[in-house]
Image (spheres, grey):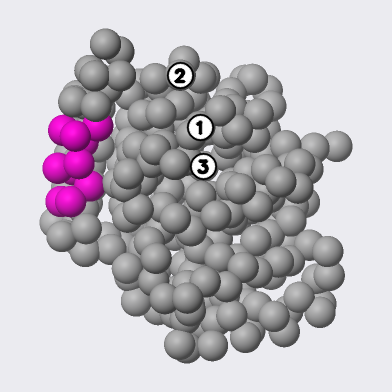
Amino acid sequence: MHKKLVIIPTYNEIENIENIIRAVFENFETDLLIIDDGSPDGTATKVKQLINEFPDRLYIEERTGKQGLGTAYIHGFKWGIARDYDFIFEMDADFSHDPKDLSRLYEACVSRKADLVIGSRYCQGVNVLNWPMSRLLMSYYGSMYVHFVLGIPVHDTTAGFKCYRTDALKQIDFSKIQHIGYGFQIEMKFNFYQKGFRIEEVPIVFRDRTLGTSKMSSGIFKEAILGVIGLKIRSWFNKK
């Protein structure tokens, strides 16, 4: 039996946190690590209350202040690697990623011998619900742009719902990851692609959050897209 760990970064997710924890455990055999960046709304307090109900399955790492999505995941990766998990997952707290799909990502990783499986919004058409058209177009064409510039052979280059094989994850030098925001998702995929790891996509339906406040903004997205040029230039020098 493989050891599996789901990582969920949080900042002010009090409306969702208990429900997402329960939904993950109801739908998937896994441990769950919450990385909370000092949420003032009591998110961490709620998680610690639930740890009594889910001992040895639910964990929390508390950090001071908002330090960025990328550093939260890297913190979680190191935590999971140190505890010998075989597969490590990324997902959001707001139910935009369906916990029922965790098993599909895991099964694809095992059956296809993949090092990274992406829950993809765009590998079979466009499967996004309740997003305004402006945001959908920004995301879709942003992914196409990343694919064109970096050559990553996936349709959803900005996806944040993923399953990593830990043996592959161990080969990433986290100290060289430069993006700590939304661009982190792109940079990790590019690192896996450059190392020749097997990347697969599984189609999912992405639903916009109904509770809480989105952490995404057009500024964050544009910063990530501009960072793609930097990744490409760095890759030329790395080859040399």
Q: Amino acid at mark 1?
A: Ile
Residue at left offset 51%, top offset 19% = 197
Q: Tell whether 58 sits left or right of 60.
A: right
Q: Which numbered disc, 1 or 2, marks the residue that appears first in the sequence?
A: 1
Mark 2 residue crowding within 10 angstroms, few (<14) / some (14–19) / many (20+): few
Q: Which residue has dot 3 on it?
A: 162
**Residue at x-position 78% and y-position 62%:** 57
SS under mark 3: strand
Residue 203: % across, % down: 46, 37
Residue 91 visible to an observer of this rendering: no
Q: Earlier in the sequence, mark 3 or mark 1?
A: 3
Element carrying mark 2: loop
Q: Which residues are magenta?
A: 222-231
Quadrant containing the N terminus in the rendered view: top right
* Quarter holding residue 8: bottom right
Membership of 153 in magenta stretch: no
Are discs 3 and 1 less than 8 Å apart at CB?
no
The disc labelled 2 sits on which kind of residue?
Lys
Residue 215 seen by the camera: yes
Tell me whether circle 1 and circle 2 mark residues in contact (CB < 8 Å). yes
The residue identified by callout 2 is 195
- Mark 3 and mark 2 lie on one chain; the one further toward the N terminus is 3
Number of disc labels: 3
- Picture coordinates of residue 144 (x, y %)? 21, 32
Q: Quadrant of the C terminus?
A: top left
Residue 230 within the segment the image draws in magenta: yes
Direction from residue 83 to residue 173 in the image, left or right: left
- Residue position for label 1: 172
Q: Amino acid at mark 3?
A: Lys
